[in-house]
Amino acid sequence: MPIGACPLREVMTLDSKQLMKFLAVVDHGSLGRAAQALNITQPALTRSVKELEAYLGVQLFLRQSTGMSLTKYGEMLERQARIVQTQLDHALDNIRALKSLEQTIVRVGVVSSASVVLLPDALSRMTSNYKNISFSVIEALEDDLTARLVNGDVDVAVAFRLPEGEDIERVATGFTHLGGTIVASSDHPFRGCPPVSLREVREKAWVLPPSGTRVRQEVADFFLANDLEPPVPRVETRSNLLMQTLVLHSNFITWFPQILLVSKEISIYPLVIKEDCKPQLRSFSIYRRKEKMLSSAATRLLYELKAELENR
């Protein structure tokens, strides 16, 4: 009987474990590799595939010396099995979230400037209004925040630009402000000089986040827009504290959010550059994971952060 013609009562007898094993063979291309990934014996997996084919009355795989490939029936089953797998994953996520609708710990991820500019007031209101809610805050670069949001390690993230798509959605975007700029300590040799050229600045000791991060790309774009290769940092680190310490006490130069330079607690200053450099602009955005039900506490924080963006 063709797959599409199976009565509902027969379709319902299909085991989700059988579909998982079927998809494992599809993904790994061979019974041996799939069995290893599933941590079962190859004969047991072979028996499961044969039972599935016997039940459906069709051949799902072509057995070849190079591995397993799908027949037209197998391709049809794969499409449906992927849908079932995705729906099951979403159902499990929602059940877990439903169980924790009253969770009292909200996990939020932020870039460094958001942790100073946006988060304090929102957290202050939340802790005043909701005595049973506490917060776990992770400050990180955007690539790390992306991974944490996808993996469910944070409920909400505040950043400048995370990759939107299948897993992540943007909830709100806030005010536009100046991006990063080149900074040094108050006693850096360049601070007492007339305006310096980008070429001179480029050759000094830099501390920056690693390659592949958004900050590093901003620096590269800035220098390339002025027909110069970006600086090669002497120190790479994800630690904002280490970067600021090296700038303050070791005459390093770095790239720093201009929105934080208004703080009296930060004793670093922008360098005066000879070139007429076009300023970079950026906006804070709030992100959440798609298809994941937020706890009531996390939803409240989301509203507070949105209000914070709208009021600036």
Image (tube, rainbow, N blue to C red):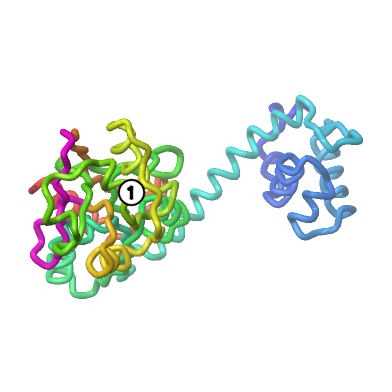
Q: In the figure, is residue 132 to the left or right of 289?
A: left
Residue for badge 1 = 203
Q: Nearer the viewer, residue 278 or 73?
A: 278
Q: In the figure, is residue 17 to the left or right of 100?
A: right
Q: Position of residue 301 (x, y in %)?
A: 23, 59
What amino acid is labelled 1 in the image? Glu
Task: Point out the image quarter for the N terminus.
Answer: top right
Q: Where is residue 38 in the image (x, y as percent from the top left)?
A: 74, 56
Image position of 166 with respect to 249: above or below: above
- Residue 258 lies within the magenta run: yes
Can residue 62 be seen here? The reply is yes
Q: Which of 48 and 268 is in front in this view?
A: 268
- Residue 169 lies within the magenta run: no
- Magenta part of the protein: which range? 257-276
Q: Nearer the viewer, residue 101 or 176?
A: 176
Predominant SS along the magenta part: loop
Look at the numbered disc 1 and give the secondary structure of its residue.
Answer: loop
- Residue at 79%, 35% (x, y): give it: 56
Image position of 278 with respect to 187: above or below: above
Q: Position of residue 12 (x, y in %)?
A: 67, 43
Classify residue 246 by image quadrant. Answer: bottom left
